[in-house]
Image: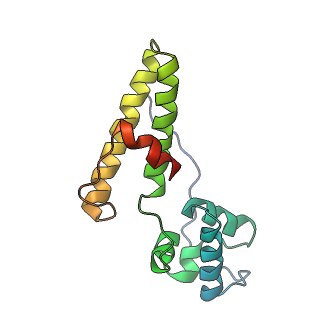
Amino acid sequence: MARRYSRKKGKSGSHKPNSHSLPSWVRYQEKEIEILISKLAKEGRTPAEIGIILRDRYGVPNAKLITKKRIREVLEEKKLSKDIPEDLISLIRSSVKLLKHMESNKKDMTATRGMLLTESKIRRLAKYYKREGVLAPEWKYSRDTASMLAEY
């Protein structure tokens, strides 16, 4: 399948193995993993960072196999999740960087196109999250409030 904004075909990459059973060398139980997740979230880590830390420091290949829930779901149960999802915040941060760049480089049309593509991704993702009930129905992205959201 082709990529959306470049005229290239997709590239193959590594995939997580389809393992439905817990490896024998994992020594953590469900409650311990949930405690680790909440501790890391209180430090200000995102769900993706928590997963990487669990993998690299604690030797947990997949938290979902142990807890039967995603990291985001564990955070929602413990009331530690943020209002705006992590992928949407990262897109908003990149749009803020592009806005700052475009203020000092007004003739950079490549950055202007990049800004249009980024804002399009933000709107599509927001539309999905509104449909799924993650974002409030009245939530709207605007360039004016983007810098406030990026600090979030």
Residue at the spot 33% in from the left edge and 37% down from the top edge: 120
Q: Is residue 3 above or below residue 151?
A: above
Q: Picture coordinates of residue 19 (x, y %)?
A: 56, 72
Residue nearest the observer in this picture, 67 or 103: 103
Residue at the spot 61% in from the left edge and 88% down from the top edge: 31
Please give left or right for residue 61 compared with residue 75 in the image: right
Residue at the spot 59% in from the left edge and 52% down from the top edge: 14
Location of residue 18 (image quadrant): bottom right
Looking at the rendered structure, the number of numbered marks drawn on it comes to: 0
Location of residue 29 (image quadrant): bottom right
Residue at the spot 24% in from the left edge and 55% down from the top edge: 138
Q: Is residue 5 visible?
A: no
Q: Picture coordinates of residue 150 (x, y %)?
A: 49, 46
Residue nearest the observer in this picture, 79 or 62: 79
Residue nearest the observer in this picture, 45 or 23: 45
Q: Is residue 4 above or below residue 24?
A: above
Residue nearest the observer in this picture, 87 or 147: 147
Please give left or right for residue 58 compared with residue 64 in the image: right
Q: Is residue 12 visible?
A: yes
